[in-house]
Amino acid sequence: MTDTTLQVPQGAFTLSRLPQRRRELLRAWDAADEYLLEALAEQLLLHDGVRILIVNDAFGALAVALAHYRPQSLSDSWLCHAATRLNLQANGIAAEAVTLLDTLTPPDTSQGAPDLVLIKVPKTLALLEDELCRLLPLLSAQSRVIVAGMQKGLPSSVWPLLERLCGPTTTALARKKAKLIFAEPLRAGEAPASPYPVCYPLEGTGFRICNHANVFSRDSLDIGTRFFLQHLPAPLDDNDVVDLGCGNGVVGLVAAARNPRARLHFVDESFMALASARENFHHNLGDGRDATFQVGDALSGFAAHSADVVLCNPPFHQGNVVGDQIAQRMFRQAHQVLRSGGELWVIGNRHLGYHQGLKRLFGNAELIASNAKFVILRAVLQ
């Protein structure tokens, strides 16, 4: 049985992950969450009126444990927000005890700068860099920055990044393979220039693509997407086409450009990805071309039988956890959302074996194209 009770000095809390799985094998927190909460208690940093900003809290463990102090919690993940709401409710804590913010929305500092900035190191260090550039102007010299992570997820480049942007760092001894880094915000109140968004010309088109920090392959077109663009379905006429897990929206953008009558729908669980997709679509096709943009848990916000084509380049990890559970969930949702005769087009690494799951679900899976690394599959809803 997976442990669902986090026990820390702040109390015992029941926590679960999202998306929920029938036989969940992973906890909704890690040892770095425990270490950080223990350190706050040991160093007597918590008191009524303390202003806390939490950054990159995966499933709300920190927000729930510190809800008494009414923290702000900033994340690029819609699932993080949804999990935090779920876990607040499960522990009988009012939703308004925690203010949830997306990464592109600045925290409220009307009552003063945060006293404590608690940062979980994200998988993408570019996101951490961008977050620090956005947050440092809002801090004061009295703000304390504490960065937490598991040793396996802490590349050596974390330390020079923190020292370049914040100031000197000290590292606490590891506990249960977790580490805490204390950074002195000597440059608090300053506005360091962020290198993001990153822009590049899209090869073979007149388009210019700009990506926020947490977008996959933000510096250039990745080889999987390049292969997918060579084999997109056509013509799409006046179909409803969904770019599922859209990232920067390149797939949907090219599909829209090739099919002027198609109605495009972009969805991703990353706020930065969806913002990038929206900006790229309108910048390159103009405001006269309509599309919808929805942040959320894959297709959970779409009505049944509302789409004709779903284009999907699914992720094969959630944070640092590798697996096909997210992809398989996307396929099941596409099965529900497609109209009769509708098509799901998927690109994936050859070794992932997506065709097996598609055949079980749709009863068919046609190989459209393949190369040494990728396969493109089409499944039709009968």
Image (tube, rainbow, N blue to C red):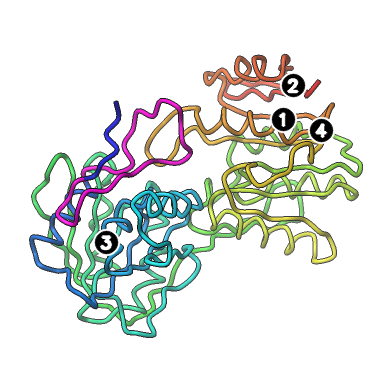
Percent position of residue 280, x then y: 68, 59
Left or right for 98, reference 379: left
Question: Is residue 210 left or right of 242 when viewed as pictured?
Answer: left
Looking at marks 4 and 1 on the same chain, the residue that comes earlier in the sequence is marked by 4
Measured from the top left, where is residue 30 in percent x and y? 26, 42
Q: Earlier in the sequence, mark 3 or mark 1?
A: 3
Horizontal arrangement in the rendering, residue 10 relative to residue 76 (left or right): left
Question: What's the mark number on residue 339?
Answer: 4
> For this view, does 195 lie left or right of residue 137?
right
Q: Residues within 10 Å of mark 1 (few under 14, many from 20)?
A: many
Amino acid type at mark 1: Trp
- Where residue 294 sits in the image (x, y, percent)? 65, 54
> Which mark sits nearer the N-terminus, 2 or 4?
4
- In this rendering, which labeled residue sits more in front, label 3 or label 1? 3
Magenta part of the chain: 7-31
- CA separation in Å, label 3 and label 4: 45 Å
